[in-house]
Image (cartoon, rainbow, N blue to C red):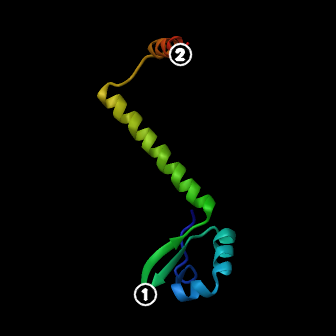
Amino acid sequence: MKTISISQDIIPVGEFKTGISKWLRSIRDKKRPIVITQNGRPAGVLIAPEEYDKLVYNKMFTESINRGIQDIKTGNIYTTSELRNKIRESRKNRI
C-alpha cells in the first residue's frame, strides 16, 4: 500500500460526502488510502478492496508463520515419515 499524501489524501467528512464517487475513483487510480476527518481529527481510512484483501492475507500469513514458530518452540513437530503415517491412519479411519 502506498503512503498517503498529506496535502491530497486527508479530507473532511463533508468534502467526502459531496464527492464520494471522485474519492472512490481516487483510491482506485492512485492506489493510496484516504484519511477522512471529522472535527479536524481522523475518523476513518478508506482503502481499495484489493489493498484490504492484501492486508488480510498478509495478517493471516504472518499469524500462520508465528503459529509454526510456536510449534517448533514447544516441540509440536513431526518428521516427514511421522506425518505420512498420521495421514495414512487418518485416511484408513475414514473408510
- Residue 41 x/y as whole percent: 41, 83
Three-letter code, disc 2? Arg
How many residues crowd around disc 2 within 10 Å: few (fewer than 14), some, or many (20 or more)? few
How many residues crowd around disc 1 within 10 Å: few (fewer than 14), some, or many (20 or more)? few
Residue at the image point whose x is 38% and y is 35% from the top:
69
Q: Is residue 90 left or right of residue 31?
A: left
94 over 38 or under it: above or below: above
87 over 19 or under it: above or below: above
- Residue 21 x/y as whole percent: 68, 79
Q: Is residue 18 left or right of residue 12?
A: right
Q: Earlier in the sequence, mark 1 or mark 2?
A: 1
Residue at the image point whose x is 56% and y is 70% from the top:
33
Q: Secondary structure at mark 1?
A: loop
> Which residue is at the front of the view, 17 or 73?
17
Three-letter code, disc 1? Gly
- Mark in the foreground, 1 or 2: 2
> Which residue is at the front of the view, 72 or 46?
46
69 over 16 or under it: above or below: above
Residue at the image point whose x is 63% and y is 59% from the top:
50
Residue at the image point whose x is 43% and y is 87% from the top:
40
Q: Secondary structure at mark 2?
A: helix
Q: Which residue is mark 1?
A: 40
Corner quadrant of residue 24: bottom right
Query: Which quadrant, please, contains the C terminus?
Result: top right
35 over 31 or under it: above or below: below
Q: Which residue is mark 2?
A: 94
Q: Is residue 54 left or right of residue 43?
A: right
- What separation in Å lies between label 1 and label 2 (alpha carbons)? 61 Å
- Residue 67 x/y as whole percent: 39, 37
